Amino acid sequence: MMKLLCVISFLLSTTINCFAQKINVKTYSLEQALAANSDTIYALDLSHLKLDTVPVEIAKFTRLTYLDLSKNKLSKLPDFLADLEYLKTVNISKNKFDVFPLVLTRIDSLTVLLANRNQFDRLPESIGYCKNLEVVDFWETPIMSIPESFYALPKLKTIDLQGIKYSPTFHKKLKERLPNVEIKLDPPCDCME
């Protein structure tokens, strides 16, 4: 039993830092980052802090490529995130977003968006501005409306819509419109179109 717990613990710690490791940089807490040279900070982990606003101090980390804001109480994101021109991965999972944060559509460098377990049910047409977006995770976020611009994202490789029940018609449309994208879906149901 102890061996199993060790394995589970290892897997969880590996999963938490998987995206930071892909960019091969040290992930800092805000406290650690504030004590360091701002030009040396590439990855910040502000998860599990019960934040209801994003600290303005983040704006000074202009070389930031990875930002984890997951498991907080956020419902809005500040406009200064769009000024972080190297930001590639943003994790806003398990927060209180009931509207998709539009500032994300202004981050030109964004390639990975983890936004699972939020409350918004539609994506804005401006999601099409995220031309570098490759991975999108909306697991258990009740997305009911996908705009035309989303289907035109040129680099999209993976989208996770598990935990949401869609109709067979929706499944078919999504797969036809995104034939070269790995789409993760639950089995279809006759519960909605």
Image: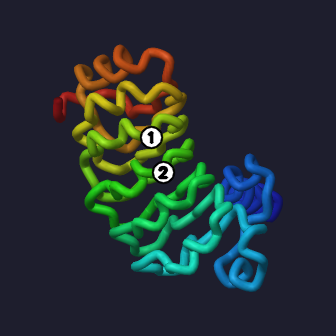
Residue 93, compared with residue 177, is above or below; it is below
Identify residue type, mark 1. Answer: Cys
Q: CA distance from mark 2 to mark 1?
A: 7 Å
Residue 10 is drawn in which quadrant?
bottom right
Compared across the picture, whether 81 is left or right of 38 comes to: left
What mark, if any, has residue 130 been given in the picture? 1
Determine the secondary structure under disc 1.
loop
Residue 149 is drawn in which quadrant?
top left
Badge 2: residue crowd in 10 Å (few <14, some 14–19, many ≥20): many
Q: Residue at x 26, y 22 (%)?
A: 168
* Residue 148, horizontal then vertical, whole percent: 27, 28
Q: Residue at x 48, y 25 (%)?
A: 154
Determine the secondary structure under disc 2.
loop
Tell whether label 1 touches label 2 (CB within 8 Å): yes
Q: Can you identify the residue that label 2 sits on?
A: 107
Which of 57 and 164 lies nearest the eye of the viewer? 57
Q: Residue at x 69, y 63 (%)?
A: 43
Compared across the picture, whether 23 is left or right of 159 comes to: right
Residue 169, compared with residue 62, is above or below; it is above
Residue 29 is drawn in which quadrant?
bottom right
Which of 96 and 151 lies nearest the eye of the viewer? 151
Compared across the picture, whether 17 is left or right of 174 comes to: right
Q: Residue at x 35, y 58 (%)?
A: 101
